[in-house]
Amino acid sequence: MIPRADALASMERDEFDVVVIGGGITGAGVALDAASRGFSVALVDKADYASGTSSRSSKLVHGGLRYLQSFDLGLVREALLERQLMVKLAPHLVKPLPILIPAFEGKRPDRITGAGLNMYDVLTREGLRRRRGGEEEWSPERHRTLGAEETAEMLPALAAREPTSAYLFYDCQTDDVRLVLTALGEAERFGAVCCNGVEVTGLVEREGLATGVLCHDAVGGGEFELCADNVVNATGVWADRIRPDELHNEAEVPTIRPSRGTHVTVSGAQLPVVAGAIVPAGKGRSIFVLPWLGRTLIGTTDNDYEGALDHIPPGDEDITYLLSAVNEFFGTSLGADDLTGAYAGVRPLIATGDPKKSVDISRKAELYETSSGLVTITGGKLTTWRRMAKLAVDRIVEREGREAPCRTAEIPLGMPAAPGELPEVEGVDQQSRDALAGRYGHAAVDVLALAAESPELAARVSPDLPDVVAEAPFAARREQT
Ligand SMILES: Cc1cc2nc3c(=O)[nH]c(=O)nc-3n(C[C@H](O)[C@H](O)[C@H](O)COP(=O)(O)OP(=O)(O)OC[C@H]3O[C@@H](n4cnc5c(N)ncnc54)[C@H](O)[C@@H]3O)c2cc1C
């Protein structure tokens, strides 16, 4: 990414067609979409890129099997189409993941789940047929039933419980933070200027219309005006803090009341899984247990949250709930001391006044245009970021009367590293090289060049994980503050 000081200087000096507030996946998507349609774009984030909900997800690029329970077919179909597209545009970053729903004691896997999986297959195939046009694309196998042996091979942690069968289906997994950074990198390639550590404190207005944003430089101090014809609010769960009255009164957006989702990780050795698993967690709910960068990721929860939105702590009760579900299912006795990590993020819930009627808007993208011209895009999923961005930029194109169709379905996100392309660097083993290729794609060449500068930089951060020390200076030098 361009150095922060250069980005800041440009923002203080230049005028832009579009300013995007928020550098999570939604804002990054809007910046890429708008820049690739020929708009001049500035993007700011008050903290670090992807430091909000976009780094606290379950890391799945998925249709969302459970939304079939509420017959949300449109949402699932759209997400499945996007899943296919992401595998095509960022094959190094969005990878197919087998997921199992195990059964025990000779029982057949649940038939209702089987019907849901059939529907998932149909919706996937329908999307593929419509889009394919002869090109080769990743195509998920139809779901199928595995026998006892294969189930235990894919979920070694479950072997002691002797599962007798399992449904197997496919979704995809990504590194959510890298997805955001990669989209921002692409946006910059199309001329967007991005800066982190810049908080928007208000709108600049002329005759009631937004003509830019007031910014506070959270790193160097100081305020400045960033001039832009269009202002897009992509601040996720903070969305109603930018212009609360305008949003609440005009667009009738009720107050956003967040719900917290906690995840924990344990070492891969303590809960070994090669595939993901859907694990029952009581009261008809289920959680995911997923292989994740050498660890096992467990989540998530869904409980009201009233604390501050910056640095959301994982809930103690949530951690207990996740560990109980896992222990009951796998027959383990994992406790808080076994955790290697925990994180939490919030979904926007809109409070309607009646607590029983609060609606979860997090999966449904919502676009609001209010009297100042502010375009607010909120909700949605990591998976559907491209659609959300298109929705927001289409609106701007329409009101400016431009002819500028969306191009993001054809823009590759980063570049995979070709086999044999990554140089051998002393001290960096094959497992680390593979991990770097997955995380950075072709740009892993630059990380390895840094690693080659000294044995300290080539070393692993932790002996049991593939991450190398060079990634830290790479982030500091190339990905702003
Ligand atoms: C627990 C959990 C698990 C999830 N798992 C999945 C999943 O597996 N798959 C999936 O598809 N979706 C998942 N989601 C949904 C997905 O993570 C979110 O929809 C998505 O990350 C939201 O991105 P965003 O850019 O809208 O918001 P955010 O990522 O929160 O970005 C908003 C940004 O705005 C910045 N900001 C706020 N105010 C200002 C200001 N005044 N000035 C400047 N910047 C500002 C913040 O710093 C932040 O970086 C999950 C959500 C949760 C909560």
Image: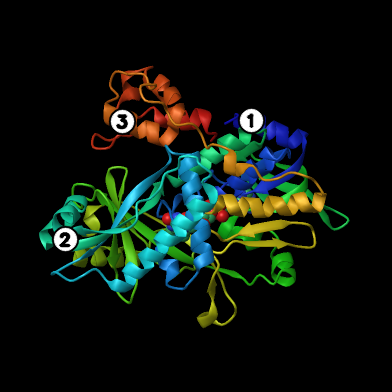
Q: Residues within 10 Å of mark 2 (few under 14, many from 20)?
A: some
Q: Name the residue type under label 2.
A: Thr
Dots 1, 2 in contact, CB < 8 A: no
Q: Is mark 2 within 8 Å of ligand 1?
A: no
Q: Where does residue 121 sit, x and y in percent of width and height?
A: 40, 59
* Residue found at the very far front of the displayed protein: 134
Q: Where does residue 178 sit, x and y in percent of width and height?
A: 46, 40
* Mark drawn on residue 432: 3
Residue with the mark numbered 1? 5
Q: Residues within 10 Å of mark 3 (few under 14, many from 20)?
A: some
**Distance in Å between CA atoms under marks 2 and 3:** 30 Å
27 with respect to 423 (left or right): right
Residue with the mark numbered 2? 332
Looking at the image, is mark 3 or mark 1 earlier in the sequence? 1
Q: Classify 211 as above or below 373.
A: above
410 with respect to 279 (left or right): right
239 or 219, nearer to the observer: 239
Q: Where does residue 205 sit, x and y in percent of width and height?
A: 82, 53
Residue 225 visible: no
Q: Name the residue type under label 1.
A: Ala
Between marks 3 and 1 in the image, the one whose residue lies nearer the viewer: 3
Between marks 1 and 2 in the image, the one whose residue lies nearer the viewer: 2
Circle 2 — which element? loop
Quadrant in the rendering for residue 160? bottom left
339 or 356, nearer to the observer: 356
Q: Residues within 10 Å of mark 1 (few under 14, many from 20)?
A: few
- Which residue is depicted at the point 41% across and 31% down? 471
Q: Where does residue 213 sit, x and y in percent of width and height?
A: 74, 48
